[in-house]
Image: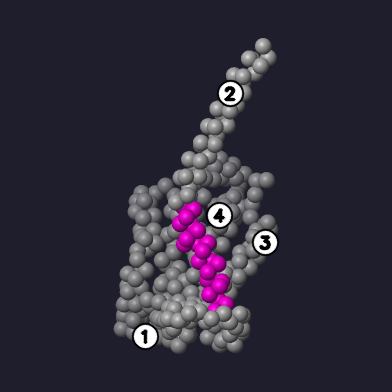
Amino acid sequence: MEIIQEFPVARKKQTFRTNKIREALWGYLFITPNFLIVLIFTIFPVFFSFYMSMTDWNILSQPNFIGMANYQKLLTDQVARVTLFNTFYFTMISVPINVILTLVLAVLLNQKLRGISFYRTAYYMPVITASVAVSLMFMWILASNGLLNQLLGSVGLKPVKWLTDAKIALNSVIGVTIWKGLGMNMIIFLAALQDIPNELLEAASIDGANRFQQFTRIIVPLISPVIFFVTITGVIGSFQSFDLVYNMTGGGPGHATTVIGYYIWQQAFKYLHMGYGAALAYVVFIAILILTLIQWVLRKRWVYSEE
């Protein structure tokens, strides 16, 4: 009798196990295409580029293993030092300004005003505009006889060599980069602001807190995880800057606007020094990793957590 009673239970367990296996197989089947894409276009290039960094491959001939020679070359490459300095300067200027401006814009556009949707769309438009189009527009604005210099001349000021003066060109590119990226972070901050309960701000107002106090003591702490996220992605993005530099200045004048992303492309695809370009890319990866880890460690000091 016990065997007869236990049989349906055992059969149910077996059916349940079979269904779980079938469900798991279907799950693996659906994620296989994405896994293959990541394997082919991300994981494999990471390991292959490390191998390339140990060779003198120039695409046209067979690669020869040269060990750490490409990394040793970095220590004596004066142009690489200039590009790394330009990249750090680019990051230290563009990221804080972008974070502050986008946060202020998000606060202003979080108001219930007539036509606010138009302004939100207008500020987001540069994000979806092609970098080539943005570059051409600002090359016309910043040209020696461009719109900006004509405006300066109309008020009696001398024209400025925005893109041809080595002391100014990088700042011009940074300004265009900030302008183009305002919309993305603004949307992220706007979503974070709309998640803040109105009851908290109303309670603070009743307790006598003004708008500035509400912003600094309630809003900023509550959205600090979003500020942290935007800062990290901004740092990573600044180290990957390429398209605006390529289109607007070509790294010039001299190497004044050559950032590390452009220099990697130049070495790997213009001069066909694929091994050296791969070594530069790994140096950038290590730099980004170190900066990200530093920010991650320091986040506990200023990022608010409900835990």
Q: Is residue 148 left or right of residue 169?
A: left
Q: Which residue is mark 1?
A: 159
Answer above or below: position of 147 versus 229.
Answer: below
The residues bearing labels 2 and 1 have C-alpha atoms spaced at a distance of 87 Å
Mark found first going from the N terminus, 3 or 1: 1
Quadrant including the N terminus: top right
Identify the secondary structure beneath mark 3: helix
* Neighbourhood count class around disc 4 (C-alpha, 10 Å): few under 14, some 14–19, many 20 upward: some
Mark found first going from the N terminus, 2 or 3: 2
Q: Amino acid at mark 1?
A: Pro
The residues bearing labels 2 and 4 have C-alpha atoms spaced at a distance of 51 Å
Mark found first going from the N terminus, 3 or 4: 4
Residue 115 seen in the current view: yes
Q: Position of residue 187 (x, y in %)?
A: 45, 54
Mark found first going from the N terminus, 2 or 1: 2
Nearest to the eye among marks 3 and 1: give it: 3
Q: Residue furthest top?
A: 1
* Neighbourhood count class around disc 3 (C-alpha, 10 Å): few under 14, some 14–19, many 20 upward: few
Numbered mark located on residue 298 in the image: 3
Answer above or below: position of 187 versus 82.
Answer: above
Mark found first going from the N terminus, 1 or 4: 1
The residues bearing labels 3 and 4 have C-alpha atoms spaced at a distance of 15 Å
Mark found first going from the N terminus, 2 or 4: 2
Q: 216 or 44: which is nearer to us? A: 44
Q: Which residue is mark 4?
A: 226
Residue 41 highlighted magenta (yes or no): yes
The residues bearing labels 3 and 1 have C-alpha atoms spaced at a distance of 44 Å
Identify the secondary structure beneath mark 4: helix
Write down the region rendered in magenta. 34-55
